[in-house]
Amino acid sequence: MAYRAPVTDFQFILDHVVDFPTVAATEMFADATPDTTQAILTEAGRMCQEVLAPVQRQGDLTPARLENGVVRCSPGFAEAYGAIAEGGWVGISAPAEYGGMGLPQTITSAVNDMMSAACLSLQLNPLMSQGQIEALEHHASDAIKQIYLPRLISGEWSGTMNLTEPQAGSDVGALRSRATDNGDGSYSVSGQKIFISWGDNDFTGNVCHLVLARLPDAPAGTRGISLFMVPKRIPDAQGEPGTANSLRVVSLEHKLGLHGSPTAVMEFDGATGWMIGAPNKGMAAMFTMMNNARLGVGIQGIGVAEGAYQHALAHAMDRQQGRTSDKGESGGAGPIAEHADVRRMLMHMKAEVFAARSLALGCAVATDMARATGEADWTARAAFLTPIVKAFGTDIGIEVAQMGIQVHGGMGFIEETGAAQYLRDVRVTAIYEGTNGIQAMDLVGRKLADGGDAAGRIIDEIESCAEGCRETLPDMAESIWQAAEALREACDWLVDHPDMDDRFAGASAFLRAFARVIGACAHLRAAMAEHTETGAAGPRTALARFYIERLLPEHTGLCAHATRGAAGLYAISNEDLAR
Ligand SMILES: Cc1cc2nc3c(=O)[nH]c(=O)nc-3n(C[C@H](O)[C@H](O)[C@H](O)COP(=O)(O)OP(=O)(O)OC[C@H]3O[C@@H](n4cnc5c(N)ncnc54)[C@H](O)[C@@H]3O)c2cc1C
């Protein structure tokens, strides 16, 4: 099925839901005028439809493979990547002085959403580079920046992120790769990394690995980790790729999905690297990349949800089975989209995509405002929303993709339809870049460490939005106001419970409840904008009503779950679990 870039929806969310004009009004992002934004979204959307979407299936059917130590990518990927690089889509938000466009992360996020929908496995490549660009921009020396940034931004080279080792997954502090000082400004990096996305390819001039490793005598845990740039080919005096570095792809993983993305076991054997940031402060530098990537991965989920929805909708509008509801446009003789239960699934999918996308773009706006103004409140807001976007966006990706299979009936289980690929591909997004469980723990741990201030400000804002809509949309406004109060109570409970196990036990439920309420508020804003523009309720109001009446109530159970503490979870012994 052809992918249709939802440019109009992005424009609507930017204008009416997440207040993007505030970003465009800052001096830093003055170039992000409505015309420029529209032109970029339209052009990127065209590229996604015409160039990326056609290779998505090929990536699935012909996975990247390792041939005599060389990674051979899926058919058509080199050309499609070329289009991404030539379009400047890697460096939309990269600094202009190194060749980027210097535009807001919000625009990058919208473009990444479309690229993920069109071909997730390929999009993961520029996503890794984007994170690396930001990490280098903030933590690298000028000499490193001069060599690497222009080439990463143009897409001539690509970037990877090397944290995971067999014994160090969620527990990054357990990593054992090591680095020793060569005495000439460089280091020798050794160790094995696993699960490295796009560990190599056959279409960029160099592959730049950001590798976490320990210096000799470094303190244990995350306090003893340093970050190194370890390129596949060592740049020569002109900065061009020179001699091959002492590293190799040992093997590629066989995966459930995302076949077009080579996931590599990497061996670094005294490879030459350069330190990024200060000794033993590698996690701070890597967090710059990871925060960027967490927002990006949440958006991957949302993009795939959009693709899966469009795919399912096309099938549901075509397939005929039995007599449909008289309430449908065809008066009983319509396609399955006019059966109430199929309609429920389609509405659910559409409403979730809108809510999650608004949440993600709202987080991107906060990131941009933090950067443009330096104000602590914006920084705290972006930090608070990032794990929510990562976990909720990817959960929605999975849920919508699995619903897409259900809409297809038996054909959803048959690979040729393409519906199953969305689910297989998106499944990993809830796992990589920090599992969704780890995101939830981050939310109730670090992100509530301010005593709930950042959370409280968002809840206040939701309540004031509801107050502003009371006259026009009283019932929906009241539901959201009540939900915000329930969220506030759950938040207070968590803040009042310093035992982290009590917080962690309810973390995932709390994260989802927060996302639900923010999503409902986004729908309310959309309905309100529709009323203001047209003076009446239309499709946006109907979708908002669906979300607020049928999906938002989930928050009640989630808040209850979030505030039950840990004791009950351990009331069953390990032995009983196995019985
Ligand atoms: C396709 C793919 C691509 C990847 N790409 C990259 C990449 O480019 N670079 C890279 O460095 N890594 C990459 N990864 C690795 C990925 O980030 C890890 O798999 C992920 O962080 C989880 O680590 P783990 O697999 O060791 O699982 P584990 O850490 O063993 O986790 C297993 C389960 O236990 C839970 N858990 C673990 N610790 C805790 C805790 N303290 N509290 C509560 N629950 C916990 C987890 O949430 C999870 O549910 C990739 C993985 C895959 C599958």
Image (tube, rainbow, N blue to C red):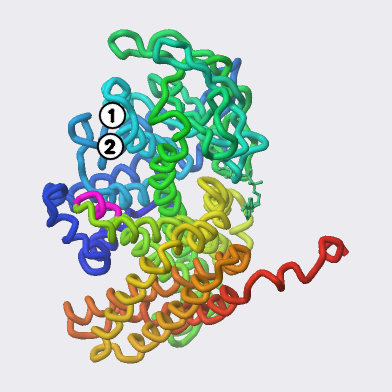
Circle 1 Cα neighbour tier, 10 Å, few/some/many (<14 / 14–19 / ≥20):
many
Where residue 338 appears, as percent x and y from the top left, is 47, 77
Report if residue 368 lies within the magenta region. yes
Left or right: 162 with respect to 243? right
Splitting the image into 4 quarters, where does residue 172 fall? top right
* Labels 1 and 2 touching (C-beta < 8 A): yes
Q: Secondary structure at mark 2?
A: loop
Residue 401: give x, y in percent of width and height.
53, 59
> Does residue 540 appear in this view?
no
Q: Residue at x 44, y 28 (%)?
A: 279
Can you say which quadrant of the picture contains the C terminus? bottom right
- Give, as a single range, the part of the protein colored magenta: 367-372
x then y, percent, for residue 245: 49, 13
**Tag 1: residue type?**
Ser
From the image, tell me which residue sits under label 1. 154
Vertical relation: 130 (above or below) 29: above
